[in-house]
Image (spheres, rainbow, N blue to C red):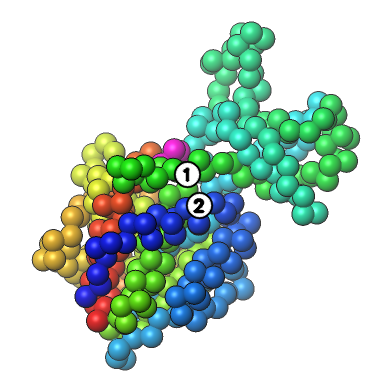
Amino acid sequence: MLNTKNCRDRLMDAAKRLLAVDSPSGFTHNAVETAEHMARLAGYETRRTNKGNLIIDVPGREGGKEIGLCAHIDTLGLMVRSLTGDGMLKITKVGGPLLPTLDGEYCRIYTRGGKVYTGTILSLSPAVHVFEDAATRPREEKELAVRIDEKVKSREDVEALGIAPGDFVCFDPKTEVTDSGFLKSRFIDDKGSAACLLTLLDLAAEQGLRPRYHTQVCLTVHEEVGHGGATLPVVDELLAVDMGCVGDDLSCTEYQVSICAKDSNGPYDYGMVSRLVELARDNGVDYAVDIYPRYGSDVAVAWCAGMDARGALIGPGVHASHGMERTHFDGMKATIDLVGLYLDLA
């Protein structure tokens, strides 16, 4: 059985390493490289798919079944939509960031020529002393723009920097780990779960443990735009490890692992969900079972793509999803413990 007693520093370090790398959907190569290095350092073989997913191969103790675990390391982001006449950047969303939380956030602009510029995402009415509607103007896509930290006064000045429509705009995750055990950052959905899986693999290798069945750990890179799980390797069971929801009408907290019985795509496999509940209950893992009406996972995408696999979804409870997110070590550790029990590590 996996020993996770003293894994806090290792887990939080893995999370901080992943969160430090900008990786909105479509711009994930650096995050994949980081995760791949971590997996190979622990002794695992890896490969990448044509679409950029990272597959980590974990040999099992016996045959008879193929297991898949998936988490995603793509995040929310922005892209340059157009350049304004006075040298600002209009934006378009990548995924579904909570736009009002971006007003005033620092960001980085990545050009296709390899240059990186800094800037600030602002309302088009950014000054109380100038605009009557500074406090009330909607914080919507068409009402926000990026102020570049360069001496630009026109569209031509911006073009001279090499910035163009289609360049990625990545906002600062502002990652912090508190003494009280909280991880607070943007993009805990789902780099927090990816850190859980990579830490589990590291601990298993260190302790000489293997899963019962051959397992493929898949870190996908298009989940936030809806097709991350479309090209996963075919398995018999697929367990998505993604964020658990915390809030109104839900029982999960940041200190638990959430087991999702149903999301917007319908119920998860009854047998798998029941087995996960039983494993958590019988082994003292703090858990909650919830329904997510506004949620979808890579499992559902794999199903829609035709994979004939049983599927389920778990993850650490995360507060304020798609905004300034927060979870706790207790919930992340509970997630690692439940995945270890599911894999029957020995």
| SS state under label 1 | loop
Residue at 50%, 52% (x, y): give it. 19
- Quarter occupied by the N terminus: bottom left
- Asked if residue 33 lies left or right of residue 336, the reply is right
Quadrant where the C terminus lies? Answer: bottom left
Instruction: Tally the marks.
Output: 2
Which three-letter amino acid code belongs to the residue tagged 1?
Thr
Residue 275 screen position, x and y as percent? 18, 69
Horizontal and vertical percent position of residue 340: 27, 71
Q: Magenta stretch: dominant SS?
A: loop
Residue 180 is drawn in which quadrant? top left
Magenta span covers which residues? 322-326
Asked whether residue 337 appears in the rendered view, the answer is yes
Which residue is disc 1 drawn over? 175
Q: Position of residue 170 (x, y in %)?
A: 62, 45
Task: Give the mark, 2 or 1, whose residue is nearer the N terminus.
Answer: 2
* Distance CA(mark 2)–CA(mark 1): 7 Å
Which residue occupies 70% across, 44% down?
109
In the shown orientation, is residue 138 left or right of residue 295?
A: right
Q: Are marks 2 and 1 in contact (CB under 8 Å)?
A: yes
- Depth order, front residue of 113/291: 113
Category of crowding for the residue at label 1, using alpha-carbon neighbours closer than 10 angstroms: few (below 14), some (14–19), many (at least 20)? some
| 215 sits to left or right of 187 | left
Residue 335 found in image quarter: bottom left
- Which residue position holds label 2? 19
Per the image, is 68 magenta? no
Picture layout, residue 145 above or below residue 287: above
In the rendered view, tell whether residue 11 sits above or below residue 134: below
Dot 2 alpha-carbon crowd within 10 angstroms: few under 14, some 14 to 19, many 20 or more: many
Q: Hey, what amino acid is under mark 2?
A: Leu
